[in-house]
Amino acid sequence: MKKFIIPAIIGIAVLTSCEKKQTEEVDHSEHTAQTEQVATDDHADHAENAENADTSVALELDNGNKWKTNAEMLPFIQEQERLLEAYDDDKDGYKVLATNLKAANEKLIKSCTMTGKSHDVLHVWLTEHMKNIDLLSKAATKEEADKLTDVLEHSMETYHQYFN
């Protein structure tokens, strides 16, 4: 009988330990999923706010001067410019370009700490810019993509007319 009790106790201990470990792993993965969902929701809220920006705000200068863009956002503006400049319209890589522009734009949005009117004016520009990136990702032909890349290049020029 003693021969069966000790292995039974060890077996129960192992099973209990495994169940606890699995529960902790599930709790950790649930926490990770919740954290990722919060980040996704925050990004979606920011993007939705860009799309639902105050329509009374126009793309305009700040009393004749360009608006200041926070330093954290500038690398992602510059990254989009580099992507557009490097794009070879002789090749059929516009889907990759759209994906890369979207990724840079997501980083741009996440890095935004601007507030007030400069933030609102930036969102006027950003809303249209985001729509054009989305259209590029859905372009059915190379000709359509070429037109949209021209529009996006012009969008970057517009950014520089209103922002530093």
Image: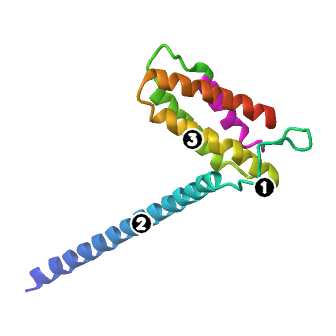
Q: Quick one: label 1, few (<14), some, or many (20+) residues within 10 Å?
A: few
In the image, is residue 139 above or below residue 35?
Answer: above
Q: Is residue 99 visible?
A: no
Q: Is residue 8 rendered to the left or right of residue 139?
A: left
Residue where numbered disc 3 is placed: 131
Magenta span of residues: 70-84
Q: Which tag, 3 or 2, sits closer to the chain's start?
A: 2
> Of residues 136 and 34, which is closer to you in this image?
136
Residue where numbered disc 2 is placed: 30
Place residue 65 in its image quadrant. top right
Place residue 107 in its image quadrant. top right
Place residue 148 in its image quadrant. top right
Magenta stretch: includes residue 82: yes
Residue placed furthest toward the right:
63
In the image, is residue 44 above or below residue 143?
Answer: below
Residue 17: give x, y in percent of width and height.
30, 73
Q: Is residue 142 rendered to the left or right of residue 120?
A: left
Residue placed furthest toward the bottom:
1
Label 2: which secondary element: helix
Of marks 3 and 2, the one in the foreground: 3
- By secondary structure, the bulk of the magenta-drawn segment is best described as helix
